[in-house]
Amino acid sequence: MWKCSFAASNTKNMKLFFVFILNALFISARAQIDTSGPVDNRFIRTVVQIKNDSGFGTGFLIKAGNRVFLATNKHMLGEWSPVDHLILYDSILVTFYTSSQPHPTVTMHVKLKENGKQLSKVVLHPNGKIDIGIVELSGELIGKPLDNNYIDTGRLMSMRIAASFITYGSHVFTIGYPAGIKSFRTNEPIVKSAFLASSMDEDLIVQQNWKNRRGQYQLVLSEGKIFLLDGLIIPGNSGGPVISNQSVEWREINGELKHLTHVKNFVLGIVSNSFSSTGITTVFSSEHILELIRKYR
């Protein structure tokens, strides 16, 4: 058992005691802020799996006032490409995380059309080349035993602000269900690493080949609040959030450890599609999600 002495003559033990106290204070201070890692676990549980007529993908929940929205891609809500008009699915299946027993997950049937007409709760970005849509779920979620922590709109970051602290090569994360991989007990998604492959300083123009419904390829220029990621982002990640790296910075100043900054996770954008055989993924900025949410106000 280690003993400490407060006797003035025992300076060695005094030094050890103060090192012990300093370490304890350091651990305590770190415990008061979220240092669970580069990704806050609460962000992970905002992400949901979507099943549509074509397969599986991803979405995430955003809270704006008393309203809850599911953000995802247009191509998760219907047959979409920038060279064809959108054909909305009648409905999608959405699976949420919940810790309630004996049912650790909840799957909800969400209607998108009724009598062949798009429901008012579905809002698609008016720009035909921007692959984002939202669905209001406020009514459907009432009374459901869900534990999801919704992303507040204040955590959706514009490219202009993001450019002040991330740049080429910055480490970011995507959260989703690549190839349908997940924890089947809780429906928790997979977190994958990626790196920023383009500038956040200005609007980007990208060119891609798309096949239309007639089987013909067309070159399409997409311009706007877009950025590119370098990482193995594959089908199933579509519609998932791209988030910044959470970090905590401490420095020793005049012999004391000072907590200088706590940079939280922010949603930078939403995964859309990949350039074939390149590892490069197109991401639309969170600003476009906010544009749609504002339509409800």
Image: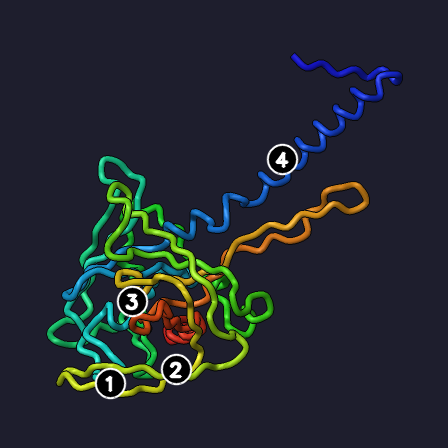
Residue density around tag 1, few if under 14, some if 14–19, many if 20 or more, within 10 Å: some
Residue 152 vs residue 106: left or right? right
Sequence-first tag of 4 and 3: 4
Mark 3 surroundings: few (<14), some (14-19) or many (≥20) residues within 10 A: many
Question: Residue type at mark 2?
Answer: Val
Asked if the residue under mark 3 is in contact with the one under mark 1, i.e. CB atoms within 8 Å, the reply is no
Instruction: Indicate whether 1 appears above or below 258.
Output: above
Cβ atoms at labels 4 and 3 below 8 Å apart: no
**Residue beneath disc 2:** 206
Q: Amino acid at mark 1?
A: Val
Q: Residue at label 4?
A: 28
In terms of sequence position, does the residue under pointer 1 or pointer 3 come before the other?
1
Q: Amino acid at mark 3?
A: Val
Tell me what residue is drawn at x 43 percent, y 49 percent. Answer: 42
At 26% from the left and 63% from the top, the residue drawn is 235
Circle 1 sits on which residue? 83
How packed mark 4 is, by other alpha carbons closer than 10 Å (few <14, some 14-19, many 20 or more), is few
* Local SS, label 1: loop
Closer to us: mark 4 or mark 3?
A: 4
Q: Nearer the viewer, mark 1 or mark 3?
A: 1
- The x, y position of residue 79, in whole percent, is 19, 74
